[in-house]
Amino acid sequence: MRKTVFQITKSVLAAVLISLAFVLLFTVIIQLFSVPMGAVKPVNQVFKIVSISAGGLIFIRGDKGLLKGVIYGVISVIITYLLYGLISLSLSISWLFLAELAIGAAAGGISGVIAVNIKKSA
Protein backbone atom coordinates (compact mmCIF):
# COMPACT_ATOMS: atom_id res chain seq x y z
CA MET A 1 0.00 0.00 0.00
CA ARG A 2 2.78 2.38 0.93
CA LYS A 3 4.55 1.68 -2.36
CA THR A 4 1.36 2.45 -4.29
CA VAL A 5 0.82 5.75 -2.48
CA PHE A 6 4.45 6.70 -3.11
CA GLN A 7 4.11 5.90 -6.85
CA ILE A 8 0.93 7.93 -7.12
CA THR A 9 2.47 10.86 -5.23
CA LYS A 10 5.56 10.88 -7.45
CA SER A 11 3.39 10.65 -10.57
CA VAL A 12 1.23 13.57 -9.44
CA LEU A 13 4.26 15.72 -8.64
CA ALA A 14 5.86 14.89 -11.98
CA ALA A 15 2.65 15.68 -13.87
CA VAL A 16 2.19 19.00 -12.08
CA LEU A 17 5.82 20.05 -12.58
CA ILE A 18 5.82 19.06 -16.25
CA SER A 19 2.53 20.92 -16.76
CA LEU A 20 3.93 24.05 -15.10
CA ALA A 21 7.03 23.87 -17.29
CA PHE A 22 4.85 23.62 -20.40
CA VAL A 23 2.71 26.57 -19.29
CA LEU A 24 5.81 28.66 -18.57
CA LEU A 25 7.21 27.85 -22.02
CA PHE A 26 3.86 28.60 -23.66
CA THR A 27 3.65 31.92 -21.81
CA VAL A 28 7.00 32.91 -23.30
CA ILE A 29 5.79 31.86 -26.76
CA ILE A 30 2.62 33.94 -26.29
CA GLN A 31 4.73 36.95 -25.32
CA LEU A 32 7.06 36.57 -28.31
CA PHE A 33 4.47 35.76 -30.98
CA SER A 34 0.91 36.81 -31.51
CA VAL A 35 -0.91 33.64 -30.48
CA PRO A 36 -4.70 33.91 -30.66
CA MET A 37 -6.37 33.72 -27.25
CA GLY A 38 -8.69 31.01 -28.54
CA ALA A 39 -5.69 28.68 -28.77
CA VAL A 40 -4.72 28.96 -25.12
CA LYS A 41 -7.31 26.60 -23.58
CA PRO A 42 -6.87 23.77 -26.13
CA VAL A 43 -3.09 24.00 -25.85
CA ASN A 44 -3.33 23.91 -22.04
CA GLN A 45 -5.49 20.77 -22.29
CA VAL A 46 -2.88 19.09 -24.47
CA PHE A 47 -0.20 20.08 -21.95
CA LYS A 48 -2.21 18.52 -19.11
CA ILE A 49 -2.75 15.29 -21.03
CA VAL A 50 0.91 14.99 -21.99
CA SER A 51 1.99 15.82 -18.43
CA ILE A 52 -0.32 13.25 -16.88
CA SER A 53 0.81 10.63 -19.39
CA ALA A 54 4.48 11.37 -18.75
CA GLY A 55 4.06 11.22 -14.96
CA GLY A 56 2.45 7.79 -15.18
CA LEU A 57 4.93 6.39 -17.64
CA ILE A 58 7.83 7.49 -15.46
CA PHE A 59 6.63 6.37 -12.03
CA ILE A 60 3.81 3.81 -12.19
CA ARG A 61 5.04 0.21 -11.85
CA GLY A 62 3.84 -3.12 -10.52
CA ASP A 63 0.18 -3.97 -10.89
CA LYS A 64 -3.20 -2.19 -10.90
CA GLY A 65 -2.00 0.33 -13.46
CA LEU A 66 -5.52 1.36 -14.44
CA LEU A 67 -6.55 2.14 -10.87
CA LYS A 68 -3.30 3.93 -10.02
CA GLY A 69 -3.50 5.88 -13.27
CA VAL A 70 -7.08 7.03 -12.76
CA ILE A 71 -6.32 8.13 -9.20
CA TYR A 72 -3.21 10.11 -10.07
CA GLY A 73 -4.84 11.54 -13.20
CA VAL A 74 -7.75 12.95 -11.22
CA ILE A 75 -5.50 14.26 -8.44
CA SER A 76 -3.21 15.88 -11.02
CA VAL A 77 -6.13 17.66 -12.67
CA ILE A 78 -7.40 18.94 -9.32
CA ILE A 79 -3.99 20.23 -8.26
CA THR A 80 -3.20 21.87 -11.61
CA TYR A 81 -6.70 23.40 -11.72
CA LEU A 82 -6.20 24.91 -8.25
CA LEU A 83 -2.68 26.01 -9.10
CA TYR A 84 -3.70 27.69 -12.36
CA GLY A 85 -6.58 29.32 -10.49
CA LEU A 86 -4.18 30.74 -7.92
CA ILE A 87 -1.77 31.94 -10.59
CA SER A 88 -4.50 33.67 -12.60
CA LEU A 89 -6.33 34.84 -9.44
CA SER A 90 -9.58 33.39 -10.78
CA LEU A 91 -11.07 30.07 -9.86
CA SER A 92 -14.43 28.95 -11.15
CA ILE A 93 -15.89 25.47 -11.19
CA SER A 94 -18.03 24.63 -14.20
CA TRP A 95 -19.03 21.62 -16.27
CA LEU A 96 -15.70 22.00 -18.07
CA PHE A 97 -13.97 21.02 -14.85
CA LEU A 98 -15.87 17.73 -14.88
CA ALA A 99 -14.74 17.20 -18.47
CA GLU A 100 -11.15 17.88 -17.42
CA LEU A 101 -11.49 15.34 -14.60
CA ALA A 102 -12.74 12.73 -17.07
CA ILE A 103 -9.94 13.48 -19.53
CA GLY A 104 -7.36 13.36 -16.72
CA ALA A 105 -8.74 10.05 -15.47
CA ALA A 106 -8.63 8.60 -18.99
CA ALA A 107 -5.09 9.85 -19.66
CA GLY A 108 -3.91 8.55 -16.29
CA GLY A 109 -5.64 5.20 -16.73
CA ILE A 110 -4.22 4.64 -20.20
CA SER A 111 -0.69 5.65 -19.20
CA GLY A 112 -0.94 3.55 -16.02
CA VAL A 113 -1.90 0.46 -18.02
CA ILE A 114 0.94 1.08 -20.46
CA ALA A 115 3.43 1.78 -17.66
CA VAL A 116 2.79 -1.47 -15.77
CA ASN A 117 3.09 -3.46 -18.97
CA ILE A 118 6.42 -2.02 -20.08
CA LYS A 119 9.16 -4.57 -19.57
CA LYS A 120 12.35 -3.29 -18.01
CA SER A 121 15.30 -3.87 -20.27
CA ALA A 122 18.23 -5.76 -18.78
Image (spheres, rainbow, N blue to C red):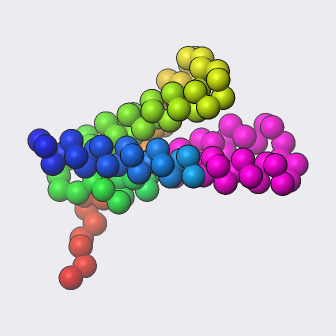
Question: 33 left or right of 97?
Answer: right
Residue 113 drawn at (x, y percent)? 30, 53
- Image: 76 above or below 117: above
Residue nearest the observer in this picture, 121 or 31: 31
Q: x%, y% of residue 97?
A: 53, 24
Q: Residue at x 61, y 31 (%)?
A: 87
Q: Position of residue 56 (x, y in %)?
A: 36, 52
Q: Quadrant of the N terminus?
A: top left
Q: Residue at x 64, y 49 (%)?
A: 24
Secondary structure mainly formed by the magenta segment: helix
Total marks placed: 0
Instruction: Give percent across and percent down for residue 64.
Output: 20, 47
| Quadrant including the C terminus | bottom left
Residues rendered magenta in the picture: 22-50
Q: Is residue 82 left or right of residue 39?
A: left
The residue drawn where x is 15% and y is 48% is 3
Q: 34 or 94, which lies in front? A: 34
Quarter of the image where one finds residue 120: bottom left
Farthest-out residue, right:
34
Give the side of residue 88 with respect to residue 56, left or right.
right
Residue 64 seen from this side = yes
Is residue 110 left or right of 95 when viewed as pictured? left
Q: Residue furthest bottom?
A: 122
Residue 65 seen in the current view: no
Quarter of image, res 5: top left
Tell me the residue at 39%/46% (across/down): 13
Question: Is residue 111 found inside the magenta-colored segment of the image?
Answer: no
